Image (tube, grey):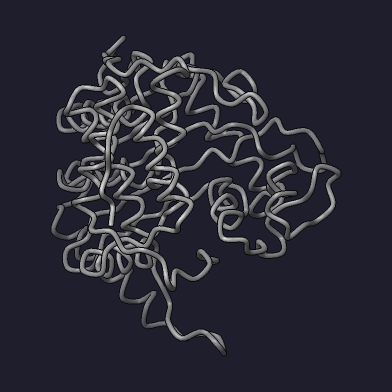
Amino acid sequence: MAQYPGTEGEARVPPGRLAADVARVFAACGMGGADAGLLADSLVAADRRGIHSHGVLRVPEYVRKLTGGGVGPRGRPSVASRVGGAIVVDGGNAMGQVAVAFAMDRAVEAAAQHGVAFAAVGRSNHCGAMDHWAMRALPHGMVGLAGTNALPTMAPWGGLDKVVGMNPLAVAFPTAEEPPLVLDVAFGMTAHGKIRVYRQKGHPIPEGWATDRDGDPTTDPAAAVEGLILPAGGHKGIGLAVMVGMLSTLLSGAGYGLESGNMADGAFAGKDGQFCAALRVDAFRPLAEVRARADKVSRELRASRCRPGVEQLHPPGFLEAGFERRYAGEGIPLNAETLAGIRRAAAEVGVAVDLV
């Protein structure tokens, strides 16, 4: 799996300090303290797990959404309807993190009663990395799933028009002794935010990630931003992206595809949709048994043979867990452009931040 360009020489920021400073920025945008903290923690959690495309790089974008982009800084999600374990959440035009945290908590509550629950979220906004929300079910002995729509950056297989989002899906599976098995994948070859990171650092993107606006392959991140992200798995990736997008929007009335915005004009406030699902493991099998078997799966994956040139095999979520352990002690690496963007956004709302 392709990761980010090297972080040598980048500033290292302690996660706690970073979260506190970013929370103050969001509070200055009008968010309540708890919501500002939740939003900041979700971004820092992404950076701690090495998912910098969905980390504090997003702070300037989020400040724009909260101060002039139509997102409600004090929007409150609520349950619009519920039939057993089928829940519809009105996101209240809050930041998507606030809406999805609420939705997953409601799904966990309903799954405790019914064994399985699915919460469809509408009137929401961008919600960050999906693994954070799927993992929210793990402390309750549950499997967590979370998906969202995304602005269209891909074309139907063989097409040239941006009408399909990468629409990521995350699944988190509880373990006993091993790190949780966590998959968080968008159905493009890369995330749009990851291309932004390469562009910030002045590095070419890997071949096979994107085309330019004419459909020709490119390694130029600037041309890729203007062009198309290629689907993972060809037509299969496009099909999966379409289905996750529909699950994220059609069941809650959120905007599908271009109804939620476009890359030229940006996202339309309150048009995003997500879903959260929780499966209570002991409604199917004893929790201890399932945890132990998940450990076995993880160990078998790691113990299997490597191809020449490959040093180590990583079950889903292991790379991210490794970054989390490492950055807890070393601090989170942030490039100069990300740091400058946070400082500019903080100054716009009258907050001084001391990140390093």
Q: Is residue 228 visible?
A: yes
At horizontal 22% and vertical 58% (from top left) the residue drawn is 290
Q: Is residue 277 above or below residue 180?
A: above
Q: Is residue 342 above or below residue 67?
A: below
Q: Is residue 117 visible?
A: no
Provide residue 152's location: percent of width, then percent of height. 64, 33
Provide residue 174's location: percent of width, then percent of height. 23, 55
Q: Is residue 337 left or right of residue 160?
A: left
Provide residue 265's location: percent of width, then percent of height. 64, 23
Which quadrant would residue 146 be assigned to in this image? top left
Q: Is residue 318 left or right of residue 337?
A: left
Which quadrant would residue 117 be assigned to in this image? top left
Q: Is residue 110 left or right of residue 313?
A: left
At horizontal 68% and vertical 44% (from top left) the residue drawn is 225
| In the foreground, 220 or 171 | 220
At horizontal 25% and vertical 69% (from top left) the residue drawn is 330
Which of the image's four quarters has the C terminus? bottom left
| In the foreground, 170 or 53 | 53
Q: Is residue 222 left or right of residue 336?
A: right
Tag count = 0
At horizontal 31% and vertical 45% (from top left) the residue drawn is 132
Which quadrant would residue 128 be assigned to in this image? top left
